[in-house]
């Protein structure tokens, strides 16, 4: 009979150890810190009180961080960051619009040859690269970028071209074609 009791005790001891092992390994909870007598550690109460104050400070800091994290973007006066800054837009001219020969050339391809002054208004003569001549007067359409002759002066022709800048605002560019006269004393 003693052997049965000892066998039962061994089985019970093994079962208790297995249960204890399962409780510890499953992480059923954290074990409380060991209780120490107050006489051995007089500063224990101070250490416990300090983390509570730190936690209170952290909550104030967290509130400040939450307030700082609230950010609003005011797009007034700023370009849209998602809109491309270079827009490739087709020409504004309608497909059926008639282009004069002067509108097919870039202004840099034309050369001012002569200026005729008259009481009704001055007239300028320009040549293309092939030597073909065209007459210009105030208001004549010229160039690929919707240019118009603003004025015909004694020594130059002023042309205005309108274009859109990067932000889409309309800008005006003035181009001057100067009359090239042969130098005195040289070949004429």
Image (cartoon, helix red, strand yellow):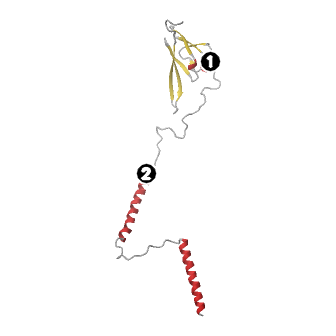
Q: For mark 1, give the secondary structure.
A: helix
Which residue is at 58% across, 19% downward? 109
Residue at the extreme bottom of the image, as rendered? 1
Which residue is at 41% across, 54% downward? 64
Residue 96: percent from the left, percent from the top?
Answer: 65, 24
Q: Which mark is residue 68?
A: 2
Q: Quadrant of the C terminus?
A: top right
Q: CA distance from mark 1 to mark 2?
A: 63 Å
Q: Residues within 10 Å of mark 2 (few under 14, many from 20)?
A: few
Q: Which mark is residue 101?
A: 1
Which residue is at 40% across, 76% downward? 36
- The answer to whether 44 appears left or right of 168 in the picture is left
- The answer to whether 63 appears left or right of 92 in the picture is left
Relative to 25, residue 87 above or below: above
Q: Which mark is residue 160?
A: none
Which residue is at 50% across, 24% downward? 173
In front of the other: 187 or 128:
187
In front of the other: 143 or 151:
143
Residue 100: percent from the left, percent from the top?
Answer: 62, 18
Q: Residues within 10 Å of mark 1 (few under 14, many from 20)?
A: few
Residue at the extreme right of the image, as rendered? 96
Label 2 near label 1: C-beta < 8 Å?
no
Residue 127: percent from the left, percent from the top?
Answer: 59, 14
Query: N-terminal of the two: label 1 or label 2?
Result: 2
Residue 110: percent from the left, percent from the top?
Answer: 57, 17
In front of the other: 68 or 177:
177
Residue 123 picture quarter: top right
Q: Quadrant of the N terminus?
A: bottom right
């Amino acid at each position: 009979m003693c052997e049965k009791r000892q066998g039962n005790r061994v089985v019970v001891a093994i079962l208790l150890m297995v249960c204890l092992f399962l409780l510890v390994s499953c992480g059923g909870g954290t074990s409380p810190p060991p209780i120490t007598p107050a006489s051995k550690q007089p500063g224990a109460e101070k250490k416990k009180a300090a983390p509570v104050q730190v936690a209170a400070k952290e909550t104030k800091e967290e509130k400040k961080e939450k307030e700082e994290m609230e950010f609003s973007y005011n797009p007034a006066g700023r370009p849209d960051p998602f809109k491309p800054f270079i827009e490739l837009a087709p020409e504004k001219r309608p497909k059926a619009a008639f282009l004069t020969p002067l509108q097919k050339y870039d202004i840099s391809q034309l050369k001012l040859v002569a200026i005729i002054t008259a009481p009704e208004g001055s007239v300028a003569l320009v040549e293309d690269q092939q030597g073909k001549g065209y007459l210009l007067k105030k208001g004549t359409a010229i160039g690929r970028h919707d240019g118009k002759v603003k004025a015909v002066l004694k020594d130059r022709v002023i042309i205005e071209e309108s274009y859109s800048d990067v932000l889409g605002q309309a800008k005006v560019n003035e181009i001057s074609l100067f009359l090239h006269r042969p130098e005195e004393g040289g070949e004429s």
